[in-house]
Structure formats: structure tokens, C-alpha cells
Amino acid sequence: MSGIVSIRNLRKSYGTFEALKGIDLDIAEGEVVCVVGPSGSGKSTLIRCINRLEDFARESTITVDGIPVQPGPALAKVRAEVGMVFQSFNLFPHLTVRRNVMLAPMRVRGTSTAEAADRADVLLRRVGIYEQADKYPAFLSGGQQQRVAIARALAMEPRVMLFDEPTSALDPEMVGEVLDVMKQLAGTGVTMIVVTHEMGFARQVADRVLFMDGGEVIETGPPEQIFSNPTEARTQYFLSAVLNH
Amino acid sequence: MEIFDTFFNMEVLLRAFPMLMKGLWVMLQLGLVSIVAGLILGLGLALVRLYAPRPAQLMARVYIDVFRSLPLLVLLIIVYYALPFVGLRLSPFWSAMSALTLVSGAYTAEIYRAGIQAIPHGQFEASAALGLSYRHTMVDVILPQAVKIVIPPLTNNSINVIKDTALASVVAMPDLLKQATQAQALAANPSPLIGAAVIYVMFLWPAVAAVSRLERRFGAGER
Ligand SMILES: Nc1ncnc2c1ncn2[C@@H]1O[C@H](COP(=O)(O)OP(=O)(O)O)[C@@H](O)[C@H]1O
Ligand SMILES: [Mg+2]
């Protein structure tokens, strides 16, 4: 049985370098999956293939809610259903916080301005940024900007949310506020795929942890198992390096 | 004072005044039409140069490079004196307008391209991830940011177009310079030329000052 995200034999090369070496993965609706692994192991590449920010090999298939992730008109549907939060926020600097959240629903879904604004305000309250709605992103702290980025992605009412190291660019004192919003989101039933180095978050929130190395999924399982009883040597080595640094 | 009688002869200037005003009007018409057409042509060229299929990109690139290397005066003379040999006869106004636009388009294309390329890649990725179409990505996200970057160099280019309208006098266009030389011939006195120079400066100085102000403001960091 295949999940809301279904990945078969995912291969991706940069020139002769194989960044992903044939990954199979099914993610169930509502599941929270944390992807961990050393830098350069292909974590970003994996999740960027899911909304086709990266092209991948012809023999590979990814489907989201049954829709093949292929170039063409269906891709717009996939992207409307898949939200993404980047390490570097990527807010639109020329738009106010509220306008950042309103833009995609208005342009992609044809939502009216008034409705989009109402919806934006609801989401901004939810991530605790409502007071800053009329400011420009440059005037917000990193943690606030990342929370706006989450609200912006949620405005499209995605079935799946992708997070690529959402707290890695933040000052340590702001990591918590972003993780809190993500925890709360995990409770709402949205499917989440989170690349992260926050092992505490993974342990507490993930339904499943995926350990990647060298473009492959080395080990996958519930957080207790991966963190307490990893079976693969590479997983053990990585975790001891990360947890005891 | 002989110098004043020669170069700043009020009587001659007053008599030349209506001709100079006609010339000024022609300069403004020709300049504005060419600037607007060049801005549109340049935007199209820049988008083709950046995003069209390979062969079209290459053609845009060749166009841009050729028209940036070709002296405007040469192009103008080709349009006015050479094209009639293949049956294309343009009036002095349209000849000058075409030449100014073709060259200005090449320069503005490079200005837009630099502006678009200055936008971080993450802006395109965030737009794509939200499901925005190519058109909405450009119109709502990329171009509004690029405009801030390109306004000072585009204003500079527009100043150059206005100055270059003076070249239209070689195809018998009654522009400001042409009117001034005719008035000079009539009066046997060069004061109208000085009058024309003063008019050019009066119109372009504020624009030049505005560019400096904009450059300082946008350069100040806030994006
Ligand atoms: N645009 C690119 N060109 C060439 N190699 C790349 C590119 N993007 C990523 N890679 C390589 O692919 C591998 C996986 O990268 P990435 O998915 O970003 O790793 P991670 O997110 O796990 O740190 C790395 O070795 C990286 O150097
Ligand atoms: Mg990464």
C-alpha cells in the first residue's frame, strides 16, 4: 500500500556524482518523518525532489496523493499540495508579512483579497506573528521570519509540509520558538518531512526517523529504536558524534 | 563686449526662441517614444536571453552584443539612407526613433538581466514551491525587486537616449540641434547653439542629479 508520498527508485546525479542512489520510501498521511544524517548525505536533495525543485532520473517515480511528480501541468497541483520551508526563510522582501502569506492563495487558488487577508491573519496568530503583520520581513528576527515562512506555506493548505533544516540558520535562542510551532503543527495531522539536526525534536515529535548517508537510506524506524538501538554501524557512529559533541 | 555679442546675443536668441522651442518639442517626443519602446524591447530581450530555449537565447545575445557595438550614428544613417534600397523608406522621425530604440533596447536588456540575476535564487525556489506560475513569479516576486536595482541605470540610459536625439539632425530631423544650427545660419551668429546647449543641460541636469540620489538611496543597503 502506498502512502500520500510514494518514492520508488529515486536516483539523482550531478554530472557523474550520484547524490541519491535509488531510494524507496512511502510516507503515510499524517505521518511525521525526520530525516537525519551527515552533511552531504543527500537529505536536501531527497526532499527537494518531492516538489521537483530538483529534477531526477527518468526511471525514478514519485507520487504525491497519487499525482506523479512530473514536469507539466500536474506539477502545479503537486506544488499546491506540498508546502516547503527553507533553511534561509526566502521570504519576499518587498512584501509585508501579511502580503507574503496572501500571495500564493490569491495567485494560485484565486482566493479573493479579503479572504486571503483573513486567512493570513488566522495563520499569523497561530504562529504568533500577528502583531508584525504589516512589517517588512527585514525588520523581523530570524525566528520570526521562519515562523512567517511556515505560515506562508500553510496558507496553501498543503497536505504535505517539507522542512529543510528550518532552524539551522537561527541564533540558538530562536530555535525553540520555531520548533514549538512545528510541534503544534505536527498535532494537526499534516504530513511532515523534516530534515533536521535537532535530535531532541526528532525524538519527541517524529513518528519515524530516517538515517541517510552517502545518498542512501541506511536505517529507518521509530525514534526510540533509532536513537537507543541503532543496528547499523554508520548510524551508531553518526549519532554518537552528534549527541556527544 | 564682443564675447557677449557673439555667443550670448540676446536679440538673436529671442528671434531664435520659437525655433528652439520647436526643436525642444521634437527632442522630447523623439526621446520619450524611443525610451518607452526601448524599455519594452529590452525587457522582452532580457527574458528571452535568460529563459527562452537555447537557440532563442543565443539570438538575443547576438542582437544585444551587435547593437551595443554599433555606433548609433552609423545605424541611423543605415536606417535612413540604406534601407530605402530594399524598399523600406522611413520618415526622419521613425528612422531616428527606430535607431534609438534598437540600441537602447540592447542596453536596457543588459540592465534588466543584471537586475534579475541579482535576485537570490531562493526567491525563485520559494515561488516555485508555493506553486506560482512563471508569469506570477516574474510579475509578483522577481520584477518588483529587480526594478529597484535597475531604476538608476535605466534612468542613466534614458538620459543617453535624450542626448542621442541630437544625432537625428543628420537625417534632417528638425530636432533641437538642427533648429539651433539653422537659426545660427539665419542670424550669422552662434548664440542659438549656446541656447540649445543651455536647454539640454536644463533638462538633463535634474535627471542626472536624480540618478545620483537614487543610487545613494538604493545603495544604502535596505532591499
Ligand atoms: N547543485 C549541485 N551540484 C553538484 N553537486 C551538488 C549540488 N547540490 C548538491 N550536490 C551534492 O550532492 C550531495 C548531497 O547534497 P545535499 O542533498 O545538499 O546534502 P545534505 O542536505 O544532506 O547536506 C552533496 O555531496 C553535494 O555536494
Ligand atoms: Mg541540506
Image (cartoon, coloured by chain):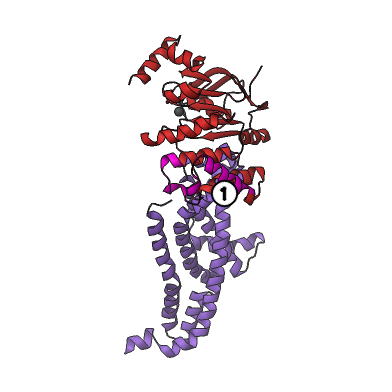
Chain colours: A red, B purple
Is residue A116 on the magenta stretch? yes
Q: Name which residue type carries label 1.
A: Asp
Image quadrant assignment for residue A232 = top left
Residue behind mark 1 = B140
Q: Residue at x 40, y 66 (%)?
A: B209
Asked if residue B78 shows in the view, the reply is no
Crowd class of label 1 (few under 14; some 14 to 19; many from 20; radius 10 Å): some
Give the dominant element type of the magenta stretch: helix, strand or loop: helix
Q: Is residue B130 above or below residue B89?
A: above
Q: Nearer the viewer, residue B212 or B111?
A: B212
Q: Is residue B171 above or below residue A20?
A: below
Q: Is residue A230 above or below residue B93?
A: above
Q: Is residue A174 above or below residue A95?
A: above
Report the chain holding disc 1.
Answer: B
> In the rendered image, which quarter contains the C terminus of chain A?
top left
Q: Is residue A18 left or right of residue A80?
A: left
* Residue segment shown in magenta: A115-144
Residue B34 lies, in percent from the top left, at 56, 64
Q: Residue at x 57, y 37 (%)?
A: A154
Residue A222 lies, in percent from the top left, at 51, 16
Is residue A19 on the magenta stretch? no
Residue B219 lies, in percent from the top left, at 38, 54
Q: Nearer the viewer, residue A82 or B140?
A: A82
Q: Residue at x 51, y 15 (%)?
A: A220
Q: Nearer the viewer, residue A225 or B109?
A: A225
Q: Is residue A200 left or right of residue B85?
A: left
